Amino acid sequence: MDPSHEVTTTYSLSDETLETDVGKVALRPHDWVTWIRLYISPIMIVVDAQSIGNEIADEYGELDEQKLGMLRDELCDLGDALSAYGHQTPLTLLVECDESSYPKWHEMAGNQDWLRGAFSIQPFTTDRFGGAKIADAETLTSLLTDATAMHVHPYKLRNLTDREYLEAVALRVEEEPERAALTRRLGLRVLKAYDEGGMRAGDPLGTTVAQRGVSEWLRYDVVTPAEQLLTSASNNQTGGAE
C-alpha cells in the first residue's frame, strides 16, 4: 500500500482471517455490522459496512457500551495499522442501513463520548440520500474518496496586486445599497486616496494611504455632518426661546 498513489485503492473485507489473501483485509466479527470493503485514498479512508437488521440496539432501544467499545477498538486498530503504512488520512465508517436502524446510527455518529474523534460514522439509506442524487453507497464513497477533487471548487488562492484589490473594492462599493451610504463613502474616500498616491504635505509621518482615506472620511463624512446637525439643533432651540 503506497501512500503516494493519487488514486483510490480498494480491498475486500472479511471477518475470517483464514480467507484473507492479498486482495482482502481481515477485521474481527461484530454483531452490528457486516464488513464489505475498504477504500484508501489520499484524502479519506472509508470502511463500507452493512448494518445487520436491528441488532444495533436491544429491545429497549439501548446501545451496549461493551459492543460500542469493541467497534471503536476495531476501527482504531485498523487506523493504527494503516498509519504504520503511511496512510494518515481521516477514517470514516460508512454504514448502509435501513430506516428503522438509521436513527440509532445517526445518534452514534454524533456521540463524541465514545467516538473520541478517532473516526466518523456516516449512516446511509437510499431514501435519505436520493434527493441529493446519490443513488447508492458506492456513489457516496466515490465523493468521500475523490482524490482528483473533481467536485471541489476550481478556484485557488493567490496573491492580489494592489490594483486588483482596489478594483474588487470599487466593485463592492458600487454594489452597496443606498441605506449603507456611509459605508459607500468610506470606500470611495479610500479609493480616492489610493488614486492620489503617496504621502501629501501636512500628512503625519508614517500615515499610510489607507489611513489618509479613513481620516478624511471621519473628518468630512462623519464629524462635520454631526457638527452641522448640532449647530442646526442649537440654533433652532435659540430661535424658539426668543
Image: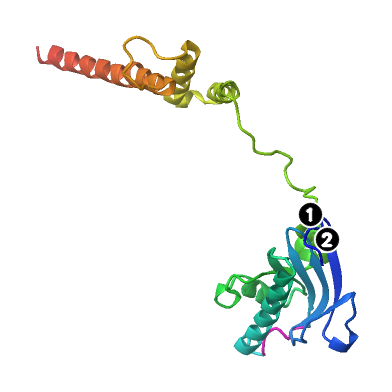
Amino acid bearing label 1: Ala
- The reply to whether the C-beta atoms of the residues labelled 2 and 1 are less than 8 Å apart is yes
- Residue 77 lies in quadrant: bottom right
Q: Which structural element holds mark 1?
A: loop
Q: Which residues are magenta?
A: 53-58
Task: Report the residue at 73% width, 66% height from top.
Answer: 87
Q: Position of residue 136 (x, y in %)?
A: 84, 64
Q: Position of residue 141 (x, y in %)?
A: 80, 62
4 vs 33, nearest the viewer: 4
| Residue under pointer 2 | 8
- Residue 153 lies in quadrant: top right
- Left or right placement of residue 192 versus residue 132 in this view: left
Q: Is residue 56 magenta?
A: yes
Answer few, some or many: residues within 10 Å of disc 1's Cα (few below 14, many 20 plus, some between 14 and 19): some
Q: Is residue 115 visible to the viewer in this orientation of the structure?
A: yes
- Sequence order check: which comes first, mark 2 or mark 1? 2
